[in-house]
Image (cartoon, rainbow, N blue to C red):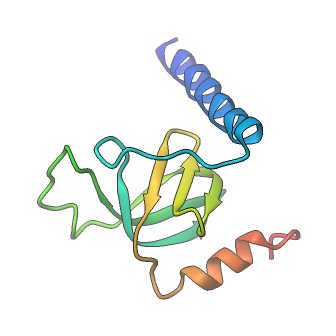
Amino acid sequence: MRAICARINSSANLTADLGRILVDRTLPILNPEEVPLVEEWNIESYMAPMLTGYFRYQKKIDPRGAEWLSFTAPLELLSVEGGVARSMERWYRLGKPSPFAQDMVRIWGESDGK
């Protein structure tokens, strides 16, 4: 039951965030103390597109964070120009992209998904 409730809350938060973007016609300003920064980011498509990279949390110091490649829940929104991404679970700030990011963004943005 806890997993179901968590999924419902996650979906409600995502819906509210995307709804605010539609109403406000702007991306949110993300608090660096609360929202992780993703360096050397890229998009990987396994079953769904996910953001990969080195995640840095300002309030949570992890000495291994600079060394461990991590990934997000499936992506729902990505704005390279705005420097933000939204997964099903949370917002992310985009730092320096990986050398492959431009190609992956182009591929992910194509309407046929190829």
Q: Residue at x 76, y 70 (%)?
A: 109
Residue 93 at x, y = what percent? 44, 57
Q: Residue at x 70, y 39 (%)?
A: 24
Relative vertical location of residue 60 with respect to residue 37 in this rendering, above or below? above
Number of numbered markers:
0
Q: Residue furthest right?
A: 112
Residue occupying the point 72% across, 33% down: 19
Give the left or right position of residue 75, taking residue 41 as reference: right
Quadrant assignment for the C terminus: bottom right
Frontmost residue, 85 versus 10: 85
As drawn, the residue found furthest toward the left would be 63
The picture quadrant where one finds residue 7 is top right
Residue found at the far top of this picture: 1
User: Relative to the observer, which residue lies in front, 26 or 13?
Assistant: 26
**Residue 111 falls in image quadrant:** bottom right
Q: Please tell me which residue lies in front, 27 or 65.
A: 27
Q: Position of residue 104 (x, y in %)?
A: 63, 78
Q: Tell me where residue 13 sits by quadrant.
A: top right
Farthest bottom residue in view: 99
- For residue 95, above or below residue 28: below
The residue at 16%/62% (across/down) is: 64
Residue 77 x, y percent position in the rendering: 65, 53
- Residues 114 and 102: in front is 102
Horizontal and vertical percent for residue 34? 33, 41
